[in-house]
Amino acid sequence: MLIPVVMCGGAGTRLWPVSRESFPKPLLRFSDGLSLFQKAFLRACRVPGTIDVLVVTNQEMYFLLQDEYLQLKTRFPEITQQAGFVLEPVGRNTAAAIASVTEVVRTKYGENTLILVLPADHLIGDEAALNHAISHAAVAAQQSCLVTFGIKPARAETGFGYIEFHPTPISNNASVHRVKRFIEKPHASLAQIFFDGGQHLWNAGMFCFTAKTLFTELGKHAPELADAAIAAVKSGQHGTLHSDAIIQLNRAAFEKIPSISIDHAVMEHSTQVAVVPCDPDWRDIGSWLSVSELSAPDARGNRVEGKALLYDADNCYIRADERLVGVVGVEHLIIVDTPDALLVVHRDRAQDVKHLVASLRQNGHLAHKLHRMVKRPWGTYTILEEGERFKIKRIVVKPGASLSLQMHRHRSEHWTVVQGCAEVLNSANGEKTFMLQPNESTYIPTGHKHRLANPGMVDLVLIEVQCGEYLGEDDIVRFDDRYGRP
């Protein structure tokens, strides 16, 4: 029995402006129409022996990933595995996430169940090679090893951590070696030594172990972390939604876990760690440079996704999904255009995009967190225009969906329906609901309860005009919400 765990978190700051805090890089979509998360989930389902697939993510991302999962099931009806979601209340790095989901597996499936940890932001070109490595890892994991996967280096790379391994394999498994040590990202000359020596592998952040083995090693090297993870699961909220099993980890217990990686917490200290060297055409999508290399270049080394016009340009990558981007007389640039932000960066400085995001966050600019179009459990809203005391939105509510029963302290709202039929509760008009058809509207004064729902079979589209002294998204008091948001 094998339970793959897809780790889906992180802010994805190096892939701004497509990636935002509320829309991280696992949701980045490729030319085949699949996102990184969908590719990882599909890859997990195809591992022989897989029973179900668990996804570890934060609470705010659940509804985005649930939509991604449903889209994947529609496109690939042969997927029979169910998705389970383990939701973190706050970010606490990989040790907390892995320990918590391991307790979930141990409770539901038993302590001898094999767990396969797969990050959601990787691409694998050769699934057969990966599954071959997993089969060897599973044997070692059943013999009380914590198994990691080491990628055979293709070059002297300074952007990855390394694993040094013993040249002699484990006696009964020629494809598995004991780990000597984990090494942080090296400088260029040391990376070259690693590459030339042949005893070092890239650390892919993928693992295979039984629940029993991980908790045995946690008990030796991080017992307080293990206890807090167990408490976060046991005292969390367990339920189902859309047939998915959902566990919301207890905030008070989870916040006690230190923010530390699984490597630092356990792997670097345990004597039970082994590695499977493999070459599954692995790529870590960690920057726009790595994304650009997924597209085929033209005769001058340019790579284009979307709408771009180039003249006398060399070795550039342009991603423009909506507007036409013109590029003249430049070289070695990465240009990424979105409706509300434009990125221009030299190819050699792609890792430094994170500094822009840090500056946006420090200055309180919402572009670090939100796109102009924001996805919500009930649909989307798009900011069309905003000024000092007003904001205009286009709101789309999915069939059968409903916004929360809510109130605003600092703004009034005016809704005008342009498509579909709206079911509205507006306490300014009494406590009963009423219907709005296209070209009909309602005005909601400040401080009045209201709710919007779509009882129809097509998308409900309306224009919302907000007016007030403060128009932030946090000016909301929820009284009732079907999606469990506070």
Image (tube, helix red, strand yellow):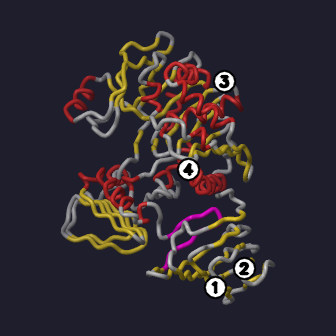
Residue 104 got which mark? none
**Whole-Å distance between the Cαs marked 4 and 2?**
39 Å
Residue where numbered disc 4 is placed: 38
For residue 111, the mark is: 3
Distance Cα–Cα, label 1 vs label 2: 14 Å
Q: What whole-number distance in Å separates the C-alpha atoms at marks 2 and 3?
A: 52 Å
Q: Amino acid at mark 1?
A: Thr
Residue drawn where x is 67% and y is 76% of the image: 460
Secondary structure under the numbered disc 4 in the rendered image: helix
In the rendered view, tell whether residue 298 sits above or below residue 312. above
Instruction: Say whether disc 1 or disc 2 marks the residue closer to the N-terminus.
Output: 1
Q: Which circle, 4 or 1, is nearer the viewer?
A: 1
The residue at the far top in this view is 171
Q: Which residue is mark 2?
A: 426
What is the magenta segment's predominant secondary structure?
Answer: strand
- 3 or 1: tag closer to the N-terminus: 3
* Nearer to us: label 4 or label 3: 3
Lateral position of residue 241 relative to residue 293, left or right: right
Q: Left or right of 309: which side holds 93? A: right
User: Which residue is drawn at the image coordinates 67% and 41% (left, top)?
Assistant: 236
Residue 377 among magenta residues: yes
| 143 lies above or below 132 | above
The stretch of residues the image draws in magenta is 373-384
Q: How many other residues sit within 10 Å of disc 1, few (<14), some (14-19) or many (≥20)? A: many
Residue 324: x and y in percent read 36, 74
Residue 471 locus on image (x, y percent): 51, 74
Say if mark 4 contacts mark 2, CB within 8 Å. Answer: no
**Res. 427 in view:** yes
Q: Which mark is residue 416?
A: 1
> 81 or 206, which is in the foreground?
206
**CA separation, marks 4 and 1?**
36 Å
Q: Secondary structure at mark 2?
A: strand
